[in-house]
Image (cartoon, rainbow, N blue to C red):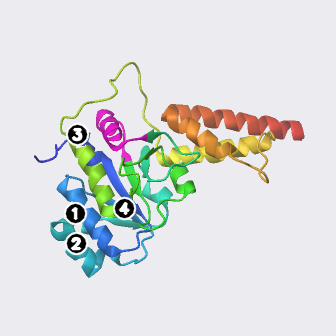
Amino acid sequence: MNPPASSHSLFDRLRFVLVETSRAGNIGSAARAMKTMGFSELVLVNPRDPEALQDPEAVALASGAVDVLAGARIVGSLEEALTGCNFSVALSARPREFSPPLFEPRALAQQLAADRGLRAALVFGNERFGLSNEQVEKCSALVSVPANPAYSSLNLSQAVQVLAYECRMAESGGETVRPDIGFRGEPADAGQIEGMFRHLEQALVEIEFLDPKNPKKLMPRLRRLFARAGLEVEEVNILRGIANQLIEKRKRRSS
């Protein structure tokens, strides 16, 4: 079955992001896994080989998906890779103390398919080290493939294949998980949310609620809290307005 042509289709709204990939062959295999499930948007963050997209091993393992490789982009940071997305999902086999909300692949795919306003990214880490805690915290959700607990390690392209398959099944008629009830605004994108967190952190420092020399886990906990909320653009603007007022009032009292 070919993917629907509508721009609201998950096939058009879902981006695959590979972070600091070591082997060019894994990039080619990931491209093939994506194309077999109808997806095409691939972004690489600082791959070990800057010429990975033209690497012979990548081209060979991509097989008939060389068009996905040809259309892929290489960027210098995860923030840049998430530009234009308003929902991002980190893939990790390891539990994280301050992770965003945790999903299994099927439930996640159903949510991505059901919410047509989401422009989402699936974020996969380095083959050996995975994603750092800081990278995970920048995402809206965390997904873990329920595998054999005695050996839960997946090859990068296998992980891409599992998530791409679940997303295809959900988009092609799978069960939806969240009906549209009441008003829902435009989801905030990654750049808007990062800007809000920087602004909020500045305000918390100004009112001496956050000690920058001893921040402990305050900001990761706030990231986790707001990740559960699924922030909309207007809500981000409200929070930034509050932060701005806190900063201005503090400055007036100090002057």
Where residue 122 sits: x, y (%)?
Answer: 38, 51
User: Which image quadrant for residue 248?
Assistant: top right
Where residue 66 sits: x, y (%)?
Answer: 20, 69
The amino acid type of the residue labelled 4 equals Val
Q: Which residue is mark 3?
A: 171
Q: Are marks 2 and 4 in contact (CB under 8 Å)?
A: no
User: Could one spot residue 119 in this view of the protein?
Assistant: yes
Q: Which residue is mark 1?
A: 32
Mark 4 Cα-neighbour bin, 10 Å: few <14, some 14–19, many ≥20: many
User: Could one spot residue 71 in this view of the protein?
Assistant: no
- Mark 2–mark 3 distance (CA, rounded to whole Å): 26 Å
Residue 121 is labelled as none
Q: How many marks?
A: 4
The amino acid type of the residue labelled 3 equals Glu
- Which of discs 4 and 1 lies nearer the camera? The answer is 1
- Which range is magenta? 103-120
Asked whether 21 falls inside the magenta stretch, the response is no
- Mark 4–mark 1 distance (CA, rounded to whole Å): 14 Å
Residue 43 is labelled as 4
